Image: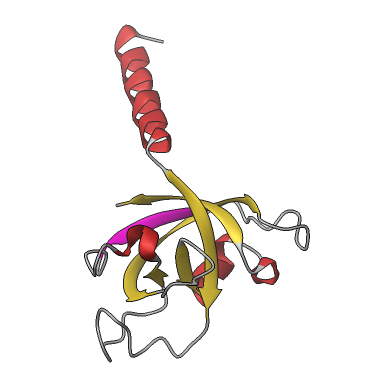
Amino acid sequence: MGAGMRVLMMVGLVICLTTAAYAAQGTATYYTPPYVPSSCYGYQNNGVMIAAASDAIWNNRAACGRNYRVRCTGPTNQGVPQPCRGQSIVVKIVDYCPPGCQGTIDLSQEAFAMIADPNAGKIKIEYTQV
């Protein structure tokens, strides 16, 4: 392997590690349709790869329209000991999850099901703004 290839591999590794280092930890729950109206977009349909932000990221509506990469990291209870499906998703913040919200990010049912078993109800996550 040439020196140039080794440098490229090291740069790629550093980028991957840097991204992982900045991922915030939290929890995710899910909500079910209808997804409109929403706090950010009223009756505008934004599809199903959407989420509601809790106070942890809402920031007085500043979260509206932000995209977050979300990855399941584990269970929050013993009901489903291995809920994660091993992939990440990108969701758009379209709504507010009011005080009492059970998760950092409240995913649409469809988005949650892509990264975890919905029977878990609540999961541990890593999330980063993209």
Colour scheme used in the picture?
secondary structure
Which is more toward the observer, 20 or 60?
A: 60
Q: Quadrant of residue 2?
A: top left
Secondary structure of the magenta portion, mostly? strand
Give percent across and percent down for residue 96: 36, 75
Which is more toward the observer, 55 or 84?
A: 55
Give percent across and percent down for residue 21: 41, 33
43, above or below 71, in the image: below
Q: Quadrant of the N terminus?
A: top left
Give percent across and percent down for residue 125: 52, 52
Give percent across and percent down for residue 53: 38, 67
Residue under the image location 38 percent in, 21 percent down: 9
Residue under the image location 68 percent in, 66 percent down: 120
Residue 103 is left or right of residue 75, and the answer is left
Q: Quadrant of residue 37?
A: bottom left
Residue under the image location 64 percent in, 55 percent down: 84
The span picked out in magenta is: 66-71
* Magenta span includes 11: no
Quick one: which residue is furthest to the top in this view? 3
108, above or below 34, in the image: above
Q: How many marks?
A: 0
Residue 85 is left or right of residue 22, and the answer is right
114, above or below 75, in the image: below
